[in-house]
Image: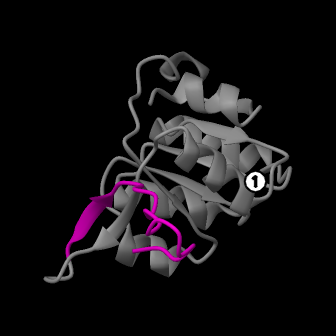
Amino acid sequence: MKLDRIKCVLKAEVLAGRKLLGTIECSTACGCDLMSDVLAFTKQKTLLLTGLNNPQVIRTAEVADLIAIVFVRGKRPSQKIIDLADEAGIPLLCTELPLYEACGILWSEGLDGCELDAKGSMQEKSFEPEKKVEGSGKPR
């Protein structure tokens, strides 16, 4: 999913990297406020959704090679943070949606999350709804 589509479905405002929105393809996303978890559990080229609003978010995105950041809950970064993102070439978006809802919308639009495989490596996680056993009302 391209970043310009993400902007539309999240009703987000672009704060940095407007020219990149139509060119950057996103295949995985992560919703997290703990930057140590972002470093430990995301993979390269992932979209980060967060409510954390400080320069460490940009630094983490640089180190983890994330493709963009969406600030949730209407959090607006300072001009210093926007300037850091511009220097790093990291698009920034801002949505009024809470983290849970923003992630859910992207999931329902087909954007995958990440999960660890048996070796501890990150793998794409695709959504597959549980199938119910006919008549029992219980998932298989």
Residue 117 can be seen, yes or no: yes
Q: In x, y percent, where is residue 109?
A: 54, 38
Mark 1 secondary-structure assignment: loop
Q: Quadrant of the C terminus?
A: bottom left
Give the percent coordinates (x, y) of residue 4. Answer: 57, 23
**Left or right of 103: which side holds 125?**
left
Q: Quadrant of the N terminus?
A: top left
Residue 129 part of the magenta segment? yes
- Classify residue 11 as left or right of residue 114: right
Residue located at (54% from left, 16% from top) = 19
Magenta-colored segment: predominant secondary structure? loop
Which residue is the site of mark 1? Answer: 72
Towards the viewer: 8 or 91: 8
Residue interval drawn in magenta: 121-140
Q: Is residue 55 left or right of 87 when viewed as pictured?
A: right
**Amino acid residing under circle 1:** Val
- Residue, x 47% and y 79% (percent of image)? 37
Q: Position of residue 139 (x, y in %)?
A: 47, 73
Say left or right for 119 vs 105.
left
The one of 135 and 56 positioned closer to us in this rendering: 135
Above or below residue 140? Residue 43 is above
Q: Relative to 121, is 12 above or below?
A: above
Q: Residue furthest left?
A: 119
Q: Quadrant of residue 54?
A: bottom right
